[in-house]
């Protein structure tokens, strides 16, 4: 199945390249593509006001352009989804179990990073070290099987959803610088299997004025990826 998808992708890319100028063709031929599956950990420390730490599956991918054997520039996107509530006492959005959900949130983590690549294994594996800027662009949906007019603790679910959206998009709470480490192992010529370890840092805590507990709003992820060259 992997090789069938690979052949199909090659045919589509060939058709696209044939319609482009030579300069654009050269650019796109040098791009390396990846697909990735990850598990994301969102630490929380709000006691009974929120659900335990969300552990979320995520699918994503990326494209990198090599500037040299050592350095490449990469853009990536990771998608996840979970449920949230809004605690009006804490005045912030908090993860929620299904019975306390007020909104269904789909997050798309768009990241830009330089990637440094090292080859200590004489072609047997590649080590990657990277870091850059990520933006968590969250879309707030109405919670499934609930109506906006429903009232909980004096607020309608529509008010909850608006509060969640205002919180996530206010004061730059979507800005997450990050660092990562990974290794890739060649499977065939042009196909690698690798893993990533990543950590995101809530830079916005510096200026938001919130007194958040410890590691709250930091993020961590581990994932496996396929690389196509």
Image (cartoon, rainbow, N blue to C red):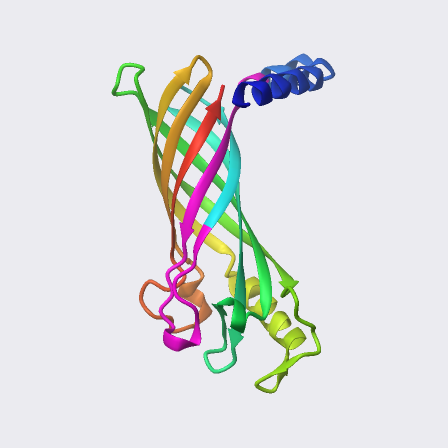
State whether residue 88 is above or below residue 165: below
User: In the rendered view, would you say 56 is above or below 3?
Assistant: below
Q: Is residue 85 visible?
A: no
Q: Residue 155: percent from the left, percent from the top?
A: 62, 83
Residue at horizontal 41 percent and vertical 61 percent from the top: 217
Give the magenta range.
Answer: 29-56
Q: Residue at x 55, y 23 (%)?
A: 1
Residue ID at (47%, 36%): 36
Q: From the viewer's perspective, is 214 left or right of 42? A: left
* Residue 16 position within the rendered picture, expressed as x and y whole percent measured from the top left: 70, 19
| 54 in the magenta segment | yes
Farthest residue to the left: give it.
120
> Considering only vertical position in the picture, is 210 above or below 185?
below
> Is 108 left, or right, of 118 in this rendering?
right
Q: How many marks?
A: 0
Q: Is residue 198 left or right of residue 163?
A: left
Residue 24 horizontal/vertical position (percent): 65, 19
Viewer-closest of 59 and 67: 59
Q: Say if 83 sits above or below 73 in the image.
A: below
Q: Is residue 102 visible?
A: yes
Residue 222 is situated, as x and y percent measured from the top left of the image, at 37, 43
Q: Quadrant of residue 215?
A: bottom left
Quarter-of-image position of residue 102: bottom right
Q: Is residue 147 left or right of residue 42?
A: right
Q: Residue at x 51, y 41 (%)?
A: 59
Q: Name the outermost residue toward the right.
A: 19
**Does the magenta portion include 9?**
no
| Of the pair 202 and 123, the residue shown nearer to us | 123
């Amino acid at each position: 199945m992997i090789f069938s998808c690979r052949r199909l992708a090659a045919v589509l890319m060939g058709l696209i390249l044939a319609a482009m100028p030579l300069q654009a063709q050269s650019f796109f031929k040098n791009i390396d593509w990846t697909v990735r599956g990850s598990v994301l950990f969102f630490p929380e420390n709000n006691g009974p006001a929120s659900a335990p730490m969300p552990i979320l599956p995520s699918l994503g991918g990326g494209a990198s352009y090599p500037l040299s054997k050592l350095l490449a520039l990469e853009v990536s996107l990771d998608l996840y989804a979970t449920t949230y509530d809004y605690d009006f006492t804490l005045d912030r959005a908090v993860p929620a179990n299904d019975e306390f959900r007020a909104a269904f949130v789909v997050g798309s983590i768009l990241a830009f990073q330089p990637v440094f690549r090292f080859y200590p294994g004489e072609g047997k594996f590649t080590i990657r070290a990277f870091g850059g800027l990520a933006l968590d662009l969250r879309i707030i949906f109405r919670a499934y099987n609930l109506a906006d007019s429903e009232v909980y603790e004096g607020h309608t679910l529509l008010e909850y959803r608006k509060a969640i959206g205002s919180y996530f998009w206010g004061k730059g709470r979507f800005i997450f610088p990050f660092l990562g480490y990974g290794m890739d192992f060649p499977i065939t010529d042009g196909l690698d299997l690798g893993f990533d370890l990543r950590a995101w840092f809530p830079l916005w805590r510096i200026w938001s004025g919130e007194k958040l507990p410890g590691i709250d709003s930091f993020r961590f992820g581990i994932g496996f990826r396929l690389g196509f060259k």
